[in-house]
Amino acid sequence: MSDHQNSGREQGMEKYFFRASAEDFKKIPGSPISYWAPDSVIRAFEHGNFLDDFVHARIALATGDNGEFIRCWSEVSFEKIGFGIKSNSDSVNSGCKWFPCNKGGDFRKWFGNNEFIINWLNDGEAVKSISDPETGRIRSHNYNGDFGFQESLSWSALSSSKLGIRYSAQGAMFVTPGSSAFRKSEKTNLYVVLSLLSSKVADYFLRLISATMNIEVGNILRIPVLECGEETDRAAKNAIALVKVDWDAYEISWDFTSLPLLHPDYRKSTLKASYQKLRAHWREMTLEMQRLEEENNRIFIDAYGLQDELTPDVPLNEITLTCNPHYRYGGDKSEEELEAMLLADTMRELVSYAVGCMFGRYSLDKPGLILANQGETLADYLAQVPKPSFPADDDNVIPLLDGDWFPDDITLRFRQFLRVAFGDAHYEDNLAFIEQALNVKGKRNYSLRDYFLGEFYADHVKRYKKRPIYWLFSSPKGTFSALVYLHRYRPDTVSVVLSYLRDFRKKLASRLDYLQQVAINPSASQSEKTKASKEADTIKKQLIELDDYERDTLYPLATEQVELDLDDGVKVNYLKLGKALKKIPGLEAKED
């Protein structure tokens, strides 16, 4: 123990105490009472530079109304989003309305949380003019200035645990509650700064400097910086590359191209074998990320002389890859539970991708987004994919019913998708593998149709953070339901849904006639008659439900020919179709 930090016992007292020099406290920025700081830390503050010497850190733009100006990127027409913009003048010249923005988000390190866009048309004209209706004062402030669209490091303003810093290439604004840091000169290596801030050493110094868990801009700038060599630059670049691959493997990334399960590197003769190969790759990715982070920690711990204070070890639940179930699900779950959850989610992602292919958002024959702009049609799809192996739906309405009532029913179409994507040879085994994985509650006789009827839409709403891109028309008790793709919506789409409802009602009425004939057929057994009568009673109630839904909701809405503008966002547009759509709890909640 050092001279300035002697510990001992007072006569008659039970607890240890520390003796420390008041002069040493003054060497720590802000002079917090960090009596436990060792000599090496005091020296770092005394002889090192501070992060403030290398980067600008800025509080983010406050729009005054995030609900008005911020969207999830998947809500709007993709062609209206300006990617790779380098300056405010470039953004104006691009003619685009929407641009990526860093907005904090979940705890994630190195890269990711690229989900949001901001209306920055004409250099933020609308944002800069929003005023308080009572006082007339402009509500927005901190417009990013020259830092807009510049290469940066971003983080969430609040954290209950650790600092999650992410690299952001040129092209993004930054919006509250996030914050960002920018190089002060060309000599500043942002990758080295990222490595430092992603290490245990940065967390250690933040605990010294700050008494709260708020990650304040000023506190980050007070972290001392020591020379650590080129390894830290390499570590950051390798970590970013690995995490980017993980981020882009999911639909929520605007750089998503295709499902990893379908990649030639992992596709095997069966879906089960394909998943096992992909799962093994994910384990390797997670362990490689853990190795990178621990090596990064070791470099900084050695440089700062903190071997007695910190270890380089990083537990698996802090390796922030979505493919890592220890991070993704956390808690005290067993390995078996974690594996079951990861398998189920991977199959949900397969189903989601298949539905995207049904609507033409994606295609098995071409990577990336296909139809992702307002009002696009099957003709637009065929212009990009002339001979699809699995064609997109022609009228943008996919029935989701308890039975094979239509040839384009969602369950039938998924079965077709599975045959095309993974072949006929192991089709039954592949289907059984999916159904078993999705049946997380162990229900008897659980089927793919049960998933579509009971869980698919809730999963979709959750995946897109209550901003669904596939909308579910649903009668009050769910006897009739059908999906449409928002980006292919047209004013006559509701009329198409109505025609499906009417066709379905006719088919139900025909089924009712048949059942009533069985119930009075003298050659039918009593059990057959009883079963027929019971089903007939159910259908009678369903027909009443469908009549009410058409008369009170769907027909009036169809006559309105409602126009939607994707720029308004899902929260506004979804409500325009009112009770015709399945209610989404919390959709009307205020934006943060």
Image (tube, helix red, strand yellow):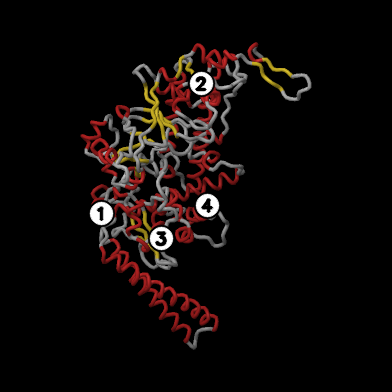
User: Which of the marked residues, 3 or 4, is nearer the chain's N terminus?
Assistant: 4
Q: Amino acid at mark 3?
A: Lys
Label 3 vs label 1: CA separation?
A: 24 Å
**Considering the numbered disc 1 on the image, is that residue within a helix, a strand or a loop?**
loop
The location of residue 201, given as percent across then percent down, is 53, 23
The residue to which callout 1 is attached is 377
Q: Amino acid at mark 2?
A: Gly
- How far apart in space, not on screen, are marks 3 and 4 (Cα)? 26 Å
The image quadrant where one finds the C terminus is top left
Check disc 4 and report the residue beneath it. 437
Cα–Cα gap, marks 2 and 3: 54 Å
Rounded to the nearest angstrom, the CA distance separating label 1 from label 2 is 61 Å
- Judge left or right: residue 526 versus residue 130: right
Quarter where residue 124 is shown: top left
Disc 3 or disc 4, which is closer to the eye?
A: 3
Residue in the picture at 33% in, 38% down = 140
Look at discs 1 and 2 and give the one toward the viewer.
2
Residue receiving disc 3: 582
Residue 35 screen position, x and y as percent: 61, 20
Q: Secondary structure at mark 4?
A: helix
User: Is the residue marked by circle 4 packed among few (<14), some (14-19), or many (20+) residues within 10 Å?
Assistant: many
The residue to which callout 2 is attached is 30
User: Which quarter of the rendered picture does the N terminus lie within?
Assistant: top right
Q: Amino acid at mark 4?
A: Ala
| Earlier sequence position, callout 1 versus callout 2 | 2
Between 27 and 183, the one lying in front of the other is 27
Labelled pair 4, 1 in contact (Cβ < 8 Å): no
Q: CA distance from mark 4 to mark 1?
A: 34 Å
First in sequence: mark 3 vs mark 1: 1
